[in-house]
Amino acid sequence: MLKKIVLSAGLIAATAFSSLSSAQTVLRFSNWLPPTHPITTQILQPWAADIEKNSDGRIKIQFLPALGKPPAHFDLVRDGVADMALSVHAYTADRFPSAYGMTLPGYADDAESAAVAYWRTHQKFFEPLNEFDGVKLLGLYTHGPGHFFTREVKPVAKLDDLKGLRLRATGGIVQDMSSRLGIVPQFTSASEAYEMLSRGVVDGAMFNADSVDSFRLLPLMKNAYQVPGGLYRDTHYVIINKNAYAKLNEQDRKVLDAASGEAFARLSGKAWDKVDAEAWKKCRRLATPLW
């Protein structure tokens, strides 16, 4: 009888351990981008799939529709409204002064080298600034080089043609360059650019090539001024709530960390380079060439 009781206890313990080891942590990711946008399909989803695979299914990142406006996502994650999110430094530029240098013009024709350089620079020089105090930083990257795009009635052949144009813009370096070039910047998130262009509120946008395509602006644009090395590049960050991160066991934290950091920067940069190249091909097929 004693042998049977011990055996039963062992089976119960084994079953409990098996259940515990297979428990899944679902991390709620507030995503303000369209589900078809390349950041979602080419960066976030592959990244999440890699984490789920390498954790043997113990970590699942669940993408939810936006739980707030794009600039609010740092606070949403810090306060636990969302477990994870992506946002753009320039949307709250005063909060991230160190990101300014990575947005300067002319230093790279691609996104991968810029994104990896940004992560390494941040880790070496900027981390002590505690700009991400209240959350845990998982990743940084830059999108591809930005250029000028305008509507058909506002051609751009030289820099002087930019004077007086109302162009969709982010903050930071773009605001400063606009004042020097005579541009009238109209500050809005990328997801609101289509409405402003379609209503004629703006004459064009300062964007990387893919964003003109993925935010459905291409049919509204007929001209561009392509800047060698890029006019600017926005910087983005991915963060996780500190408590959500702390609740992961050590093994799963290692899985999440391995997929993040420089690995995430490289993944993101390669994705941007791919979609930018595809977008330029679409631009060249327009009836009115962009250059």
Image: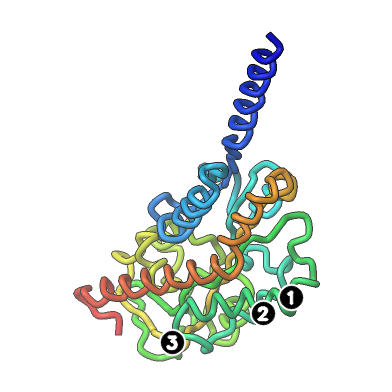
Q: For marks 2 and 3, give the one nearer the viewer.
A: 2
Residue 201 appears anywhere in the view: yes
| Residue at x 64%, y 31% (from the top left corner) | 17
Left or right side of 244 for 204: left
Left or right side of 24 for 282: left
Give, as a three-letter code, the residue at label 3. Answer: Val
Position in image of residue 145 (x %, y %): 47, 79
| Residue, disc 2 | 121
Please tell me which of labels 1 and 3 falls first in the chain. 1
Query: Which structural element holds mark 3?
Result: loop
For residue 217, above or below residue 113? above
Give, as a three-letter code, the residue at label 2. Answer: Thr
Q: Are marks 2 and 1 in contact (CB under 8 Å)?
A: yes
Please tell me which of labels 2 and 1 falls first in the chain. 2
| Residue, disc 1 | 126
Report how far apart the C-alphas of labels 2 and 1 lie in the structure: 7 Å
Packing grade of label 3 (10 A; few <14, some 14-19, many >=20) is some
Q: Which mark is residue 227?
A: 3
